[in-house]
Each structure stands twice: as structure tokens, then as C-alpha cells.
Image (cartoon, rainbow, N blue to C red):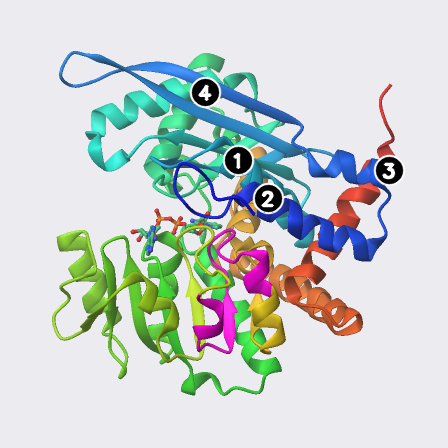
């Protein structure tokens, strides 16, 4: 496996293809069908200028990739990151296809990204960048064709700008063009905390299978943003011990359990978790290897590798992040009996509630929080049960089983529709 030249991490597209082949082998998919499913359908690269606060104009590069749209409109987040590459976006788009299929929502997969460190930009520059990027990818996006959502370093405000920009071109409001919007402009109840809620739900199902009592679980979390911080908040509120968390600045550890509400307040004030009073400072690497029962990677790709996998102490890994584990590390975890709930299942609640948001926008009829939670719980429960059952029957890990469930659904749709013309 090659490292991604831009950031030194394993190449995520090669990881995604390796995972695909493993499941495709077990499904006995023929080579022609594999050829279709392995490749992106559309890959758009855009270079565009943005007015900066100092009066200069700066060029930026962005991507929007649609992997497969045989089961419905393309769906996937937009990421702002200085290290985004086309291969990363390709991989993430493919994972979105499988993710939508594993929870059986009628979407295909897409992903977008802009090469930018948003922390270096003012609010106004970010708005300009977002509006221009939206315009550049408007040849692809739309409520019936391709529906973006937030991802790393983008949020409800980013989605509000995207929705407004698209609506300005249309001449009327089109809320269903993006999900993850603020509630006041067509967002859904439960969307902000959806990914974390789903990750906690599958963690409980995995703990139940391993007969590990919930109240005893010690949890370590890498990443303290939408997915990681909200997961920490939920777990702490439910009485579990969150013993370690990290963000880009480093990690903090307390074997008695961190005071999560105080840490959230500290992060809000200081922008980082390191320096949190009373906790021991640990390195980014140590956060993955501390004594704990559950590890939740909730930051970025390729962080669990063959080098550190033997040292991970958790018995359950819940991939809130996309692609945190390399195929080599997967094999080590499986051999060691670590129950790893893969990204396409563990973080699928985000896109599931995005689907609910899109449905509500199209119908102009909005649901109560309880209705969202109830429908989400049912989706996650059904998906986990189907995947766990297949993993048991096939004597394979949950990733391979989840990919098998998903790839079979996309392959069936592809075959039923046939090849045009
Ligand atoms: P975010 O921008 O809100 O938070 C990311 C966090 O990770 C930040 O705290 C950042 O400091 C930290 N981080 C980045 N690199 C790190 C590193 N090397 N070590 C430790 N921490 C690091 O992003 P998010 O929305 O929480 O997304 C996190 C992951 O979850 C991504 O892989 C994303 O694709 C995935 N995900 C998010 C959602 C969602 O609804 N937000 C849904 C599905 C999957």
C-alpha cells in the first residue's frame, strides 16, 4: 500500500479498493461488475478564485466525486482540509455508497473537499470560498441529483451558505439541496448529534454481544469535534468513563474518567483539549493505546495501522471516523478477537438522519425529535443485526460482512437496471 504523498498516511483509495475486493471475493462478483463498482462515476476538480480580506485574490482547488448513483441521488459530505486529495475524496465517496446501502437508504455515494486550512481564513473569506465552491460544483449538486452535508471542518453554517447560494441561482429556496442545515432553514431535529448517537448505539450492541457490562466500560476517543465530542458527552451523561480524548493539539487522560462537560467548556474557551486542568497530557499515538475497553476513532483516516494495532488495548473499536483502520490492522484486530464496528455502519446514523432531513424538506413537513430518534434506532438496530448475523455465518469480521451486505445491494441494483444503452 502506498502512502499518500501529501500527508504520509496510507492511501485511502487503495484501502477502500482492498476492502471492496475482499467482500467482492466472498460474494463471487464477476470481474465486469467489479469493474463498474470499483470506479467513481464522476470526478470533478475545480480551481477557483476567492477575494481575500487583504484585497488580493487567491486560487483554491476543490473536488466533488460521485461514486455510484444506482440506488438513488448521490449523498456525501464536504470536507475542508489542507491535506485533502482526490484519492481521499474518491475513497470517501465509495464508502458513502456502501454506507447508504448498508443502512438501506435510497442514496448513492459522493464526497467533496476543498484544499484549505479553514483556521487560516476569516469568517468572510470562508463564506466567499463556500459560495464560490458551491457555484463551481452546481453542475453536479441538486435535490434530485447530489446532496452535500457537513464533514470535517464544515458545519451547519457552511450548509446554510451552500443552500443560500444554490437558492440564489434557482430564484427560490431549495432547502433539500444540502443536509445538516440549521433547524430554522429546514434542518432536522437530531441531525447534529446523529453520528455520535448512532456510534454509541452500535457500541452498546457490540458490548452486549461480548457480555461486557456497560457501566464498567472505559472509553478512549480520538477527535473532539462533531462526532467525538458529542459521543463523549452522551457516554459521560450515561455514566460511562471517558478516560482519554484527543484533538489535533494532543491527548488528555484520566483513568478515573474525564469531567466531559468541563472539558467541553475548556475546549470552547481555548480551542484545544490539551492543558485541561487535572488531566494527564498524552501524545496523539498514546490516545489510541491507553488502557480502555472501547476505542472510538473520530478524527481521520489511516490512524490504526499494522504498527500500532498490536498495542491497542480496547476490546471494542467503533469507527466514528471514516477509514481510520488500514486493511493490515483489520486482520490483526480480527485475529486478536477485537470487535471492530466498521465506519460504514458505526457512523451511518449521520447520513440516515440526513436522509430524514431531505425527506422532511421535500415534504415541507417536519418531525418531532422523538420520531427522528425512534426511526433512527430502528435503522441502526436492523443494520447491525443483519451485519452481525452475516459475520457470524461467514466467520469474518464486521467490516467484510457490512461490505458484503452493502455491495450486494448496489450490485443487485446495477444488474436490475442493466447497462445503458
Ligand atoms: P470535526 O471537524 O467536527 O472534528 C474533527 C476532530 O478531529 C477535531 O477535534 C480535530 O482536532 C480532530 N483531529 C484531526 N486530526 C486529528 C489527529 N490526527 N489526531 C487527533 N485528533 C485529530 O469533524 P467530524 O464531523 O467530527 O468528523 C470526524 C470524522 O467523523 C471524519 O472522519 C468524518 O468523515 C467522520 N464522520 C462525521 C460525520 C458527521 O456527521 N459529522 C458523519 C459520518 C462520519
Q: Quadrant of residue 26?
A: bottom right
Compared with 73, 239 (above or below) is: below
Q: Residues within 10 Å of mark 2 (few under 14, many from 20)?
A: many
The answer to whether the residues at label 2 and label 1 have Cβ atoms under 8 Å apart is yes
Q: Which residue does the numbered mark 2 point to in the structure image? A: 14
Q: Which residue does the numbered mark 3 point to in the structure image? A: 415
Q: Nearer the viewer, mark 2 or mark 3?
A: 2
Q: In this picture, which residue range is highlighted in magenta?
A: 308-330
Q: Quadrant of residue 27?
A: bottom right
Q: In percent of the image, x 50 and y 39: which residue is there?
A: 88
Tag 4 secondary structure: helix
- Across and down, in percent, residue 10 comes to 49, 48
Q: CA distance from mark 3 to mark 4?
A: 34 Å
Q: CA distance from mark 4 to mark 2?
A: 34 Å
Q: Nearer the viewer, mark 4 or mark 2?
A: 2
Answer with mark 2 or mark 1, whichever residue precedes in sequence: 2
Tag 1 secondary structure: helix
Q: In percent of the image, x 39 and y 79: which residue is there?
A: 292
Q: Nearer the viewer, mark 3 or mark 1?
A: 1
Q: Quadrant of residue 113?
A: top left
Does 313 sit left or right of 206 as displayed?
left
Along the viewing direction, whichever of 166 and 95 lies nearer the viewer: 95
Answer with mark 3 or mark 1, whichever residue precedes in sequence: 1
Answer with mark 1 or mark 4, whichever residue precedes in sequence: 1
Q: Is residue 258 magenta?
A: no
Q: CA distance from mark 2 to mark 1?
A: 8 Å
- Across and down, in percent, residue 91 comes to 57, 41
The mark tally for this picture is: 4
Q: Which residue does the numbered mark 4 point to in the structure image? A: 166
Q: Label 2 CB, ligand 1: below 8 Å? A: no
Answer with mark 2 or mark 3, whichever residue precedes in sequence: 2
Q: Which label was assigned to residue 87?
A: 1
Amino acid at each position: 500500500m502506498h502512502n499518500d504523498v501529501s500527508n504520509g498516511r496510507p492511501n485511502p483509495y487503495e484501502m477502500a479498493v482492498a476492502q471492496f475486493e475482499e467482500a467482492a471475493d466472498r460474494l463471487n462478483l464477476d470481474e465486469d461488475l467489479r469493474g463498474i463498482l470499483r470506479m467513481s462515476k464522476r470526478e470533478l476538480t475545480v480551481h477557483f478564485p476567492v477575494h481575500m480580506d487583504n484585497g488580493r485574490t487567491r486560487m483554491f482547488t476543490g473536488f466533488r466525486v460521485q461514486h455510484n448513483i444506482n440506488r438513488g441521488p448521490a449523498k456525501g459530505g464536504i470536507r475542508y482540509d489542507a491535506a485533502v486529495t482526490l484519492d481521499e475524496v474518491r475513497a470517501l465517496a465509495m464508502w458513502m455508497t456502501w454506507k447508504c446501502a448498508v443502512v438501506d437508504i435510497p442514496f448513492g455515494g459522493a464526497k467533496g473537499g476543498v484544499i484549505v486550512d479553514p483556521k487560516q481564513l476569516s469568517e468572510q473569506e470562508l463564506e466567499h470560498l463556500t459560495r464560490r465552491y458551491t457555484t463551481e460544483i452546481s453542475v453536479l449538486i441538486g435535490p434530485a441529483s447530489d446532496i452535500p452535508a457537513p464533514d470535517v471542518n464544515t458545519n451547519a453554517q457552511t450548509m446554510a451558505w451552500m443552500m443560500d447560494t444554490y437558492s440564489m441561482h434557482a430564484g427560490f429556496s431549495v432547502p433539500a439541496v444540502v443536509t445538516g442545515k440549521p433547524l430554522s432553514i429546514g434542518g432536522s431535529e437530531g441531525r447534529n448529534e446523529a453520528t455520535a448517537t448512532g456510534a454509541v448505539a452500535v457500541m452498546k450492541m457490540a458490548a452486549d454481544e461480548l457480555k461486557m457490562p456497560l457501566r464498567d466500560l472505559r472509553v478512549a476517543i480520538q477527535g473532539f469535534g462533531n462526532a467525538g465530542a458529542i459521543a463523549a458527552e452522551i457516554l459521560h451523561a450515561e455514566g460511562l468513563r471517558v478516560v482519554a480524548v484527543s484533538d489535533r493539539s494532543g491527548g488528555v487522560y484520566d483513568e478515573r474518567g474525564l469531567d466531559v462537560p468541563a472539558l467541553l467548556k475548556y475546549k470552547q474557551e481555548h480551542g484545544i483539549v490539551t492543558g485541561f486542568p487535572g488531566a494527564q497530557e498524552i501524545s496523539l499515538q498514546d490516545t489510541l493505546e491507553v488502557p480502555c475497553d472501547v476505542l472510538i476513532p473520530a478524527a481521520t483516516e489511516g490512524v490504526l495501522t499494522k504498527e500500532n494495532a498490536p498495542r491497542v488495548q480496547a476490546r471494542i473499536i467503533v469507527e466514528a471516523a471514516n477509514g481510520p483502520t488500514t486493511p493490515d490492522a483489520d486482520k490483526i484486530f480480527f485475529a486478536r478477537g477485537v470487535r471492530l464496528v466498521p465506519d460504514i455502519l458505526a457512523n451511518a446514523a449521520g447520513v440516515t438522519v440526513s436522509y430524514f432531513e431531505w425527506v422532511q424538506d421535500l415534504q415541507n413537513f417536519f418531525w418531532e425529535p422523538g420520531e427522528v430518534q425512534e426511526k433512527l434506532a430502528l435503522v441502526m438496530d436492523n443494520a447491525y443485526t443483519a451485519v452481525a448475523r452475516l459475520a457470524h455465518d461467514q466467520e469474518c469480521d464486521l467490516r467484510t460482512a457490512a461490505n458484503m451486505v452493502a455491495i450486494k445491494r448496489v450490485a443487485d441494483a446495477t444488474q436490475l437496471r442493466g447497462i445503458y444503452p
